[in-house]
Image (cartoon, rainbow, N blue to C red):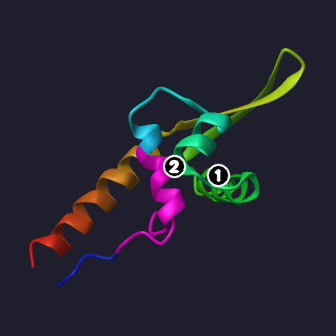
Amino acid sequence: MFKELDPILHSQLRLSIMSLLMSVESGEFSWLLEKTDSTRGNLSVQISKLKDAGFIKVKKSFRNNYPLTTCRITKKGIDAFEKYVEAISSYLKH
């Protein structure tokens, strides 16, 4: 029997965001935008979905009078990501 995949993480862009944030303490919006090759609007929507799920925390501030959005993964997000990776790995073994 195949394990259920988390629908929040089963999106290419959200999975990309989570994968990137797993390897850093935090990531700025502009960095995530560059790494995911997404549009600003789509990235913003997907970040909001991850935030609403409790998988990431979003901090809004300013740097040199410019808005700065920084994201970091939460404990819940790490657990969900690891569970997702484990579930998808089980698909590859069959």
Quadrant (top left, top right, bottom left, bottom right) of the N terminus:
bottom left
- Residue 55, visible in the rendered structure: no
Identity of the residue drawn at 44% across and 69% down: 10
Q: Is residue 9 above or below residue 7?
A: above
Quadrant (top left, top right, bottom left, bottom right) of the C terminus:
bottom left
Identity of the residue drawn at 66% across and 38% down: 29
Is residue 15 within the magenta segment? Answer: yes
Could you tell whether 74 is left or right of 80 in the image?
Answer: right
Taking the view exactly as shown, the residue that stands out farthest to the right is 65
Q: Secondary structure at mark 2?
A: helix
On the image, the x and y values in percent for residue 63 come to: 80, 18
Q: Residues within 10 Å of mark 1 (few under 14, many from 20)?
A: many
Q: Nearer the viewer, residue 76 or 29?
A: 29
Which of the numbered marks, if any, corresponds to residue 47?
A: 1
Is residue 44 within the magenta segment? Answer: no
Q: Quadrant of residue 58?
A: top right
On the image, the x and y values in percent for residue 45 come to: 71, 59
Dot 1 amino acid type? Ile
Q: Which residues are magenta?
A: 5-19
Identity of the residue drawn at 85% across and 14% down: 64
Identity of the residue drawn at 46% across and 48% down: 18
Q: Is residue 35 above or below residue 63?
A: below
Dot 2 amino acid type? Ile
**Which residue carries the number 2 mark?**
17
Taking the view exactly as shown, the residue that stands out farthest to the bottom is 1
